[in-house]
Amino acid sequence: MATSLQQHTPYVDLSREEWSALRARTPLPLTAAEVERLRGLGDVIDLTEVREVYLPLSRLLNLYVGATEGLRGAVSTFLGGSPQPPTPFVIAVAGSVAVGKSTVSRLLRSLLARWPEHPRVELVTTDGFLLPNAELRRRGLRKGFPESYDRRALTRFVADVKAGRAEVEAPVYSHLTYDIVPGARLTVRRPDILILEGLNVLQPAPPGRVGLADYFDFSVYVDARPADIRRWYLDRFGKLRATAFRDPDSYFAKYAAVPEKEAMEYAENNWRTINEPNLLTNIAPTRGRATLVLQKSERHTVRRVRLRKL
Ligand SMILES: Nc1ncnc2c1ncn2[C@@H]1O[C@H](COP(=O)(O)OP(=O)(O)O)[C@@H](O)[C@H]1O
Ligand SMILES: CC(C)(COP(=O)(O)O)[C@@H](O)C(=O)NCCC(=O)O
């Protein structure tokens, strides 16, 4: 586990085997019915992976929620005030386009909600805070780059949730129309846990501003080799071509109709000109700010876990 070299890093570095062994200390096994429910998520995730990697992670997060609650109580006693109701525990999930953030986030939502201490788990993606396509075009911005988000509105949203406001609204993005849905809003009502998923959630604040990360209680960076992520991006594009892009309302309907070669050239170009430079320039440098890094192998299985020491 911790070799002498690692003693001076802020992380504990665990192999998959070392991490999976912690499963024995996870007091909440999955029942057959729950395994079935997880299958119903529609994700292709392997159930051994759920048991060996994500169930221990849900236990670790459960410990963090409990400890944060304990600390909050102690501080409120120190301040001599009356006990306040708990505020939502905020978990950020960061990483490249197509690395598997949505899959990990949906899974964590299901697993975390099984713990009796925090049944209400909300998942919000930062895409709702993207500027509309027309505005991106006007300003010459690439979608997904840090400047393509309304960072102020996103920070205010998380600050309000974290402050325990009864209802907090967020704008909505549609992958079908590939744009912000005019006038649409989602409402978050004081959950026990908020999972905030997005490419740029670990981006540092501009000088003099409060950063988004200042409101996080825990953050996960989903990591993999860029060549693997590229393949997953292209695979997913290929699959969407045979499914969601067939919807005539889809922004990408054209790519279901054109020959495969032409569609895949478009996807390749998107990867090379937008998602890869965004990963290398903006996203990967934020990895060292995460509380936990999940490092995936070429088949999506997690091969190393790095956890920040306290
Ligand atoms: N654990 C996993 N096992 C197998 N396939 C996965 C896993 N996680 C993600 N994928 C696949 O990889 C692609 C990208 O995952 P997704 O969660 O959509 O990424 P992101 O939200 O980061 O863009 C999808 O096609 C998804 O089905
Ligand atoms: C919508 C996204 C920016 C992801 O947003 P996130 O919720 O991670 O902030 C991304 O999925 C995307 O569409 N990128 C643009 C390039 C492309 O079409 O692949």
Image (cartoon, rainbow, N blue to C red):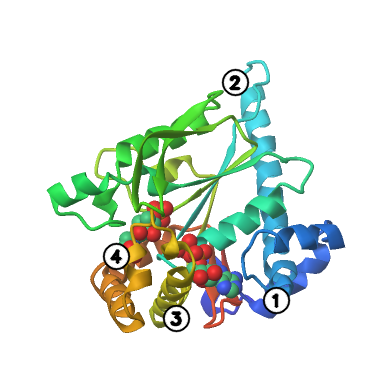
Inter-mark Cα distance, 2 to 3? 51 Å
Q: Are marks 1 and 4 in contact (CB under 8 Å)?
A: no
Query: Which mark sits nearer the N-terminus, 1 or 4?
Result: 1
The circle drawn on residue 170 is: none
Q: Residue at x 62, y 29 (%)?
A: 75
Give whichever of discs 2 and 3 has the lower sequence position: 2
Mark 2 and 3 residues: CB-CB less than 8 Å, in contact?
Answer: no
In the image, which disc is placed on residue 79? 2
The CA distance from mark 3 to mark 4 is 16 Å
Task: Residue under label 4, please give it.
Answer: 278
Q: Amino acid at mark 1?
A: Glu
Q: Residue at x 48, y 58 (%)?
A: 290
Between discs 4 and 2, the one toward the N terminus? 2
- Residue 216 position, x and y percent, is 50, 44
Which residue carries the number 1 mark?
A: 18
Q: Earlier in the sequence, mark 1 or mark 2?
A: 1
Three-letter code, disc 4: Asn
Which x, y percent locates residue 256?
38, 70
| Position in image of residue 247 (x %, y %) | 43, 59
Q: Secondary structure at mark 4?
A: helix
Work out how far the residue at label 1 is from the one at label 3, CA to CA, in angstroms.
24 Å
User: Pointer 4: residues within 10 angstroms few (<14), some, or many (20+)?
Assistant: many
Q: Earlier in the sequence, mark 1 or mark 3?
A: 1
Q: Are marks 3 and 4 in contact (CB under 8 Å)?
A: no
Earlier in the chain: of badge 3 and badge 4, it is 3
